[in-house]
Amino acid sequence: MNILGICSASAHEDSIGPWVRDGLARAALAEGDASGAEAAWAGLTNSGLERLRQPVPWVLSLFNRGKLALQAGRTDEGRQLLEEFLHRWGGLDLPEVTQARELLAP
């Protein structure tokens, strides 16, 4: 509690950081800047505890980074990211899950 009687811990519990990084990545990709998009999504993927408070953009960043890595010819990295994505959300009926499975198929 601070001097106003407000619990100051709650002000730091949620962060818009993951959503901002996702938005920056999408904007970069829309402008044709795949490396900028990868950098923004990598920042989201590696954002520590902040990402755990916002799991949706975090898990989707694995999918998006995996696709971009495959497109750039970094097959091992792309496959690893897509496999991690499927580990997290593979049981869900989502278009991204279907696409990840298709990209990983031999």
Image (cartoon, grey):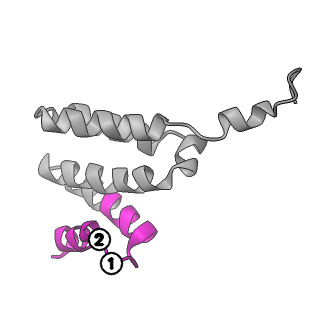
Assign a secondary structure to mark 2: helix
Magenta span main SS? helix
Label disc, if present, on residue 97 of the rendered structure: 2
Q: Where residue 19 appears, x then y in whole percent? A: 42, 40
**Residue 39 left/right relative to 3:** left
Magenta span has 92?
A: yes
Q: Report if the CB atoms under discs 1 and 2 are less than 8 Å apart.
A: yes
90 vs 78, nearest the viewer: 90
In whole angstroms, how far apart are the C-alphas of marks 1 and 2?
A: 7 Å
Q: Amino acid at mark 2?
A: Val
Q: Callout 2: 10 Å neighbours few (<14), some, many (20+)? A: some
Q: Where residue 95 appears, x then y in whole percent? A: 24, 70
Q: Quadrant of the N terminus?
A: top right
Residue 98: quadrant of the picture: bottom left
Q: Where residue 104 appears, x then y in whole percent? A: 22, 70
Q: Residue at x 41, y 50 (%)?
A: 57
Q: Amino acid at mark 1?
A: Asp
102 vs 70, nearest the viewer: 102
35 vs 2, nearest the viewer: 2
Q: Quadrant of the C terminus?
A: bottom left
Dot 1 corresponds to which residue? Answer: 93
Q: Nearer the viewer, mark 1 or mark 2?
A: 1
